[in-house]
Amino acid sequence: MSLDAIIISNFDTESLSGSNPQRLSLNGRVADIQTILNYIRNDGKIVNPVVGSDRDNWAGTPTLNGLILANFLTKKGFSAELINDFYRDKDKFINAVHRNPTLIAVSTSFIYSKDHLTRVIRDIRQHAPDSFIVAGGPFVYQSYLIHKRSDEPLYSSKEIQQSYLFFEDSNRPSIDLYIVSHHGENILCNLLEILRNGQSPKSIPNTAWYESSSVHFTNRIDEKVSIEDCSLNLDEFDDSLFSSNVMPIQASNGCPYHCAFCNFTSDRRFVFSKSIDEIILELKAVARRGIRYVWFVDDNFMLGSGDLNKNLNRLANENLGIKWMIFIRADALKNIDFQLLRSAGCVEVRLGLESADPGILHNMQKRADPDTYRIVVENILKVGINCSCYFIFGFPGETLETAQRTRDFIKSIEYPELEGIMQWSLYPFMLAPLSPIFEEDQRKRYGLRGTLTRWSHTTMNSEQAQQEVIKTILSTERSGAIYRSDNMLLLDTMTSEQKKAFFNARNILSKKSMTGELSSSEIVKGFCEVIPSSMWNV
C-alpha cells in the first residue's frame, strides 16, 4: 500500500547540557539503573539486551512534534508513518520507504546546527536516494529569521553562516524544500496535494528551495493555529507507539516570558493553555492505552496558571493512576498546595533556576530570586516529589564569585534528609542568535564578543564557563546529574533511602571516572554495596 508521508521527528540527539557528557558510562552506555544491573549480573560487562531500557523511562518518551504532525495529516485524510527516532527505528523507516512515500518530512525540533542536519539527511538519503525530502520546524525558521538580518554585521559572521541554513552553499543538506514557518502543518498538506498532482511545489507560500546554488524564498502569508491542532487522537496510532509506557502531553503552548538567553522564536498568537477538561480527556485516553507516565512538555506548565490548585484538585479527584512530570517557573509554585501536587500524580518538577546570584538573575531578565527558589525546592522535596534543577554558568556579568554563589546554593538545596531527590543539569552559557543578549546594545553593555559556544565578556569567557561546570560537578556531595533513562519501575522497588544511596554511589563513581580510571571490579563493588541484592537478578 502506498504512503503519503514519512515523518521523522527525532535523531537520538544529545543534549546541550555540559553535565550530561560527564555522567558515568559503562562500556559506552549511560549508567542507568537497568544497565548497572546488567553490568553486575555479567561480571563487569554489558550483555544485550538490557532489560528495561526500552520502556518505563523518561528518555523513551515519543517526541510530541512528530505525534502532532502525524495526527494532523491523518485528520486531513493523508496516510503517514511516524518514525520517532531515525537511528533507533531505522528498520521501520526502511520498510516505510518501500511503500513509495510521496515525501519524507523531517522535523528540526531537535536539530541545533547545519552540520547536524546535513549528517542526518545524508543518512536518510542512503536508504531513500530519490525521495522528495522536506524539512521544517524551529531550526529552519530560526535560520530564515537570521538570514533576514544577514545585512547586519552581527548576523553575517562566518560562524553564523556555517552554523545556519540559507547562507553558504557548501555542505548544505540535500533537501528538496524547506517549510519556513512557525507552524507548517497546513503548508505540508498543500505540498502533498501538489506533489500528488505532479505540479511544481515552488509556488507554495512560506517555503524555500535552492536553485543554481542560490536560495529562493516564496511569499509570506499569515498562518493560523488553533488549540485543536495541538491535540492528539491516540486512536490513530498503533500499539508500538505506546510500548515505552510513557507519553508526552502539551497542556499549554508557548511562553510569555522573555529571558535574555532564550532564542526560541515566540509569537504571542501561539501562546495558549488548554482547559483542564481537555487535559483530563487526553490523560484518560493515555490511560486507556496502558500508559503509566506522562511528560508534560510545556515551557511553563499551564502557563503558570494562577488557579493551579483548582486544576490539581480536579486531577487528583480523577485518580487516573498516571505519574507525571512538569517544567514550570519556581514563582508559579509559591502558593501551591504541594501535597495536592503529589496527590494529583506529579512525581517530578523541573525548574529552570539558571543562577543563584540576584545580579545574574536580573541580567537574565528572570524576575526571580534565590530565596523563592530555596523555599520552592524544599517544599517539593518535603512531599516526596523529585526536583530537577537547571543552571547556566557564564552568562554576562558572571564572575568566579557569582559562580561560586550558585555552586554553594546547589549544595544547600540537596536536602538529603527529605524524601524527594534533587538532581541537576548544568549548562555553559550559549550566545544564541536571536536571543536578547545577542544584540548590539547588550554586547556593548557587557563587552560581549563571539557567538554560540565561543564567546567572551568583561568578566568571563566560554572556556572559563566550562571549567565552572566541571568544578560544580566535582564539588557537589549529595546531588548529581540527571539520568533520564533510569527505569522508573526498577527505582520504585527501592525505598527513598536506598535510591539516595544508589544515586550518591553513582555520583561518586562518575566523579572518579572524570579524574582517573575506574576498574570494573571497583564499579561492581560500589553498586553492590547500595543496590539491594534482591534486584541483582531482576
Image (cartoon, grey):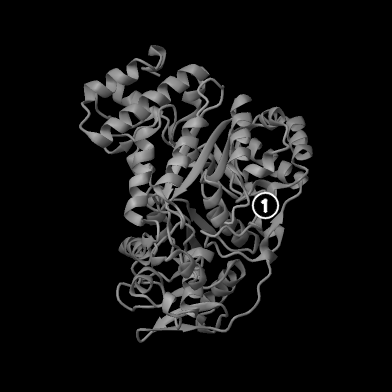
Q: Does residue 269 appear anywhere in the picture?
A: yes
Where residue 507 appears, as percent x and y from the top left, is 37, 29
Mark 1 packing: few (<14 Cα in 10 Å), some, or many (20+)?
many
Q: How many numbered tags mark residues here?
A: 1
Q: Residue at x 50, y 64 (%)?
A: 437
Q: Where on the picture, by quarter, is residue 454?
A: bottom left
Q: Camera-side residue: 265 or 83?
A: 265
Q: Is residue 316 left or right of residue 430?
A: right
Where residue 260 appears, as percent x and y from the top left, is 54, 60
Q: Residue at x 45, y 54 (%)?
A: 10
- 313 up-or-down from 270: above or below: above
Q: Camera-side residue: 9 or 200?
A: 9
- 231 up-or-down from 198: above or below: above
Q: Residue at x 24, y 28 (%)?
A: 45
Q: Amino acid at mark 1?
A: Ser
Q: Does residue 43 appear anywhere in the picture?
A: no
Q: Is residue 260 left or right of residue 487?
A: right
On the image, numbered disc 1 is attached to which residue?
252
Quadrant in the picture for the C terminus: top left
Where residue 304 appears, as percent x and y from the top left, is 69, 47
